[in-house]
Amino acid sequence: MERMIKDKIRKITPVLSVYHFLFAFFGALFHGFPSRKVKVFAVTGTNGKTTTVNIIAKIFEEAGYKVASFSSTEFIINGKAEPNRFKMTMPGRAVIQKLLKRAAREGCQIAIMEVTSEGIKQHRHRFINFHSACFTNLSPEHIESHGGFENYKKEKGKLFSKTRKRHVINADDEHADYFLSFSAEKKLRYSIRKDSSAEIKAEDVKGGKEGVSFFFEGEEMLLPLMGKFNVYNALVAIALAREEKISKEVIKRGLRKIGTVSGRMEEVVSSPFKVVIDYAVTPVTLEGVYKEIKEILSPRKLICVLGSCGGGRDKWKRPVLGEIADKYCDKAIITNEDPYDEDPQEIIDQIEGGFSKITNSKPRTPKYEKILERREAIKRALEVAKEGDVVVVTGKGSEVWMCLARGEKIPWNEKEIIKEELKKLNIK
């Protein structure tokens, strides 16, 4: 049965590809090829895209540009924001072309957008005149969808093959050479390594509760975001800004004005214990979040709420996420995320498979619980937390929907749910 389904998918895939291509073309045609009127910067990679888009936008706004930005969390055009309710970073059906048209009409000189492998696969990047393509990093993601990691990487590469003006590449990523292999009028590498020959470098990187600091060309830069990994995101913005002749002083001011990126290492409760939410859905990001929280906030105990997306997406990573939680969390609560048409209990059980059941050849008392209802899982985490602890809830971030079977979606606001449950517990 499974083979029959796969055979049918293979037969219709070329037809779907043509459909998406034509939709991209006629969408651009209908809206008058708006990217010809705006300088478009594309940000792609596995992690950090949303934060990078936000930082770029802030620096260029500080420099006096009218800016549009399109990310997985929101669409902002000349200061007017609306949430991205599509549950897609790159919405289809010519939505991006429509947004670019609005940006041009508003007089925006710069548009910054996240570009995903799924979007590229469905030709949503077509007929957008990208000026700059920026690469953040690459780790396994969407493997089933693309039929392997190499195909996933190649989809990302298509953005660089179509962007001829400027490429901005993370020189510290193990896949940097692949992305540097594409032709461009200008290539800029960025790095935080002391021995790097990259054109854009951060030195003396330090992290703390108030954010991170680093030196760029002798000037100290302060970025009020938790996590040293955010320095990489800032360097993308710095590279683009310097190419557009924006001064270091303006860059410095722009970085200082960065507010919390919604759903990205966002502290939503500060007392009597801290609660942090983060979108982290890959093993690399989840481990990074846990590491940074342990290092920066030094919790008495780290209490973690986590799940994994359904819909047949990256099943391989579920036990890996469990293994990471087992390593870093003092208490873990495995719960539902976006099951789509999969059995959510099966997803939870697969995450559980990553937790060790034995310590020193003896049965181990489980350090985790399984609670199917996500709101109840959050409530449980808040119940067990004590002063000095940190509760970190991952997987949803600032998403506005939870996706269930048969296309059903229910409204979801992680931040508000945490505050509601905390209020019910009468914790002060």
Image: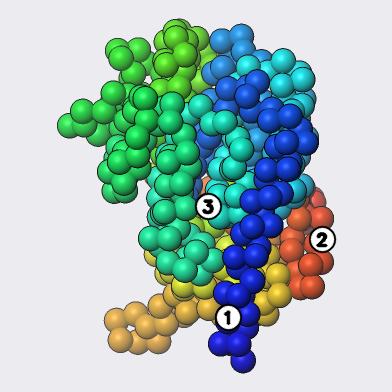
**64 lies above or below 345:** above
| Residue carrying label 2 | 410
Q: Label 3 crowding class (10 Å Cα cut-off): few <14, some 14-19, many 20+?
A: many
From the image, tell me which residue sits under label 1: 6
Instruction: Quadrant for residue 18, please give it.
Output: bottom right
Mark 3 lies on a secondary structure that is: helix
Most foreground residue, 188 or 411: 188
Q: Earlier in the sequence, mark 3 or mark 2?
A: 3
- 10 Å neighbourhood of mark 2: few (<14), some, or many (≥20)? few
Q: Residue at x 76, y 73 (%)?
A: 405
Q: What is the x, y in percent for residue 69?
A: 64, 30
Q: Which mark is residue 124?
A: none
Mark 1 or 2, which is nearer the eye? Answer: 1
Q: In the rendered structure, which disc, 3 or 1, sits on the residue that comes first in sequence?
A: 1
- Mark 3 vs mark 1, CA separation in Å: 21 Å
Q: Secondary structure at mark 2?
A: strand
Give the residue type that dot 1 points to: Lys
User: Measured along the vertical axis of the image, is residue 160 above or below residue 419?
Assistant: above
**Depth order, front residue of 279/159:** 159
- Who comes first in sequence, dot 1 or dot 2? 1
Mark 3 or 2, closer to the camera:
3
Q: Which residue is mark 3?
A: 117
The residue located at (70%, 37%) in the rendering is 28
Q: How many marks?
A: 3
How far separated are the C-alphas under marks 3 and 2?
26 Å
Residue type (three-letter) at the residue carrying disc 3 = Ser
Q: Is residue 136 visible?
A: no
The residue type indicated by label 2 comes to Ile
For image coordinates 63% across by 46% down, the residue present is: 124
User: What separation in Å lies between label 1 and label 2 (alpha carbons)?
Assistant: 30 Å
- Give SS at disc 1: helix
